[in-house]
Every structure is written in C-alpha cells, then in structure tokens.
Image (spheres, helix red, strand yellow):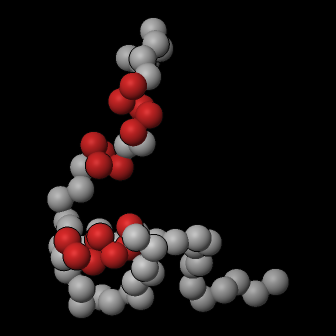
Amino acid sequence: MAREDRVRFPGRTLFLTEDPSLLAQQLQGVDLAWDPARPLVDNISTDEITPGWVCYHYDETLAE
C-alpha cells in the first residue's frame, strides 16, 4: 500500500493570522487557503489551546 505524500486533516482549519479581519472572517465561516507568506501569530501558549470547559471543571485528581 502506497503512502500519500501529504497529510490531510478533515474539517476546517483556523489559521491564527496576525490580521484580525481575517480571523473574524474565518469565525464567520470563510475558509482561507494556506498561504505561507501570511504572518501567523507566533506566541501561542497552552492557555490559548485549552478548551474552555477545562476552566470550569475541578476535581481532586486535577493536580495528578
């Protein structure tokens, strides 16, 4: 079985661009094509990639 030469992700991709208007367009349903020249935000921390529900859930195993 031959392996594909590229990785494919189903669904939509949110490009975290430095341009707020492009971010807003994506959140309204516009799909952006990959553009390696488009500046992306480069200071993402785990706070930005943690799902929101995690911020409201706590139990005794949290520290583990």
Residue 35 vs residue 40: left or right?
Answer: right
- Which quadrant of the view contains residue 35? bottom left
Picture coordinates of residue 16 (x, y %)? 29, 68
Q: Residue furthest right?
A: 1
Picture coordinates of residue 49 (x, y %)? 35, 49
Residue located at (45% from left, 9% from top): 60
Q: Residue furthest top?
A: 60
Residue 51 vs residue 5: left or right?
Answer: left
Residue 23 vs residue 34: left or right?
Answer: left
Work out whether residue 48 can be spotted. Answer: yes
* Towards the viewer: 55 or 43: 55
Q: Taking 13 as reference, is 55 above or below it?
A: above
Work out whether residue 40 can be spotted. Answer: no
Residue located at (24% from left, 90% from top): 37
- Which quadrant of the view contains residue 26? bottom left
Residue located at (37% from left, 43% from top): 50
Q: Quadrant of the N terminus?
A: bottom right
* Towards the viewer: 43 or 64: 43
Picture coordinates of residue 56 (x, y %)? 39, 25
